[in-house]
């Protein structure tokens, strides 16, 4: 399954702002009928990549 990790560069964004961006992105993905997961990446997260 495809996945989209959201990130930002503004350290002044509070958690609720990031959560709102995540909800918006998930809504856009759902509205288009896409089959992918979407999540807000956090400092220290580790992602595995595969083909």
Image: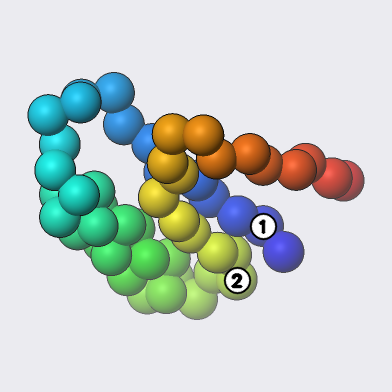
Secondary structure of the residue carrying tag 1 is strand
Residue at numbered disc 1: 2
Q: Residue at x 67, y 42 (%)?
A: 47
Per the rendering, the mark at residue 26 is none
In the rendered view, would you say 44 is above or below 38? above
Mark 1–mark 2 Cα distance, whole angstroms, equals 7 Å
Q: Quadrant of the N terminus?
A: bottom right
Q: Residue at x 55, y 64 (%)?
A: 37
Q: Residue at x 87, y 46 (%)?
A: 51
Q: Is residue 28 among the parts visible in the rendering?
A: no
49 relative to 41 in the view: left or right: right
Q: Indicate the quadrant where residue 2 lies.
A: bottom right
Q: Is residue 39 among the parts visible in the rendering?
A: yes
Secondary structure of the residue carrying tag 2 is loop
Residue at numbered disc 2: 35
In the rendered view, would you say 48 is above or below 23? above
Residue 40 image point, x, y percent: 40, 50
Q: Indicate the quadrant where residue 34 lies.
A: bottom right
46 relative to 39 in the view: left or right: right
Q: In the rendered structure, which disc, 1 or 2, sits on the residue that comes first in sequence? A: 1
Q: Residues within 10 Å of mark 1 (few under 14, many from 20)?
A: few
In the rendered view, would you say 3 is above or below 8? below
């Amino acid at each position: 399954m495809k996945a989209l990790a959201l990130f930002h560069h503004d350290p002044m964004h509070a958690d609720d702002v990031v959560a709102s961006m995540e909800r918006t992105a998930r809504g856009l993905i759902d509205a288009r009928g896409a089959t992918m997961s979407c999540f807000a990446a956090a400092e220290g997260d580790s992602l595995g990549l595969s083909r």
